[in-house]
Image (cartoon, grey):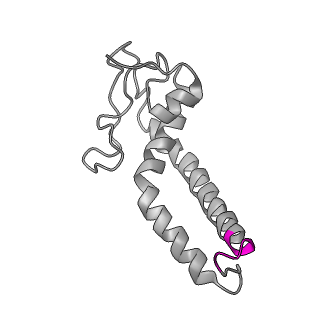
Amino acid sequence: MATEAKTALGKVVKMKCPHCGKGHLFANENAFSFSKLGQVKSECTECGTSFNPEPGFYFGAAYVSWGLTVAMWVAILVALKTLNALGVLEFGFLTHPKTFLITGIVFTVLLFPVLFKLSRSIWATSFIK
């Protein structure tokens, strides 16, 4: 039995159908299983809503992905500055750029599958009703 997501935020986070909130958006629900990583189902198994309303529909999700990635890098910078202020880690943006770059690259690589699927889920929920 499928659990229902009632709010738009719930549908995005749970990656459910933008219309009914019950069916899964992706063919493979696990973000860290790379088989069929970005493959979106053709339609909802619960209500029949088409997840591909037109060819190339998900190209716009690249802009959402870019925004999520920028937000993640800003959050990393804030976290490093906070750790510096607490005295846990010595960090300065201009004095320790390698720390910032290495941390950002590691988080980008590790969270790529999650950000990729999340951006498609946000895009679908924004335009499929």
Q: Residue at x 50, y 35 (%)?
A: 13
Q: Residue at x 28, y 48 (%)?
A: 33
Report the residue that reaches farthest toward the bottom: 95
Q: Which residue sits furthest top?
A: 47
Q: Is residue 113 magenta?
A: no
| Residue found at the very far front of the displayed protein | 87
Please tell me which residue lies in front, 43 or 82.
Answer: 82
Residue in the image at 58% along x and 22% along y = 7
Residue 10 location (% of width, % of height): 54, 28
Q: Position of residue 91 (x, y in %)?
A: 67, 80
The picture places residue 6, in percent across and down from the top left corner, at 54, 18
Q: Is residue 39 above or below residue 49?
A: below
Q: Residue at x 40, y 29 (%)?
A: 52
**Residue 86: in magenta span:** yes
User: In the drawing, does residue 35 fall left or right of residue 50?
Assistant: left
Residue 41 sits in which quadrant? top left
Q: Specify whether 22 is left or right of 86.
A: left
Start and end of the magenta stretch? 83-89
Query: Could you tell me residue 122's position as x and y percent?
Result: 54, 36
Residue 28 lies in quadrant: top left
Compared with residue 106, is residue 75 higher up or lower down, i.e. above or below?
Answer: above
| Farthest residue, direction right | 85
Could you say which is closer to the camera, residue 87 or residue 39?
87
Residue 111 figure quarter: bottom left
Tell me: residue 48, above or below residue 42.
Answer: above
Quadrant containing the N terminus is top left
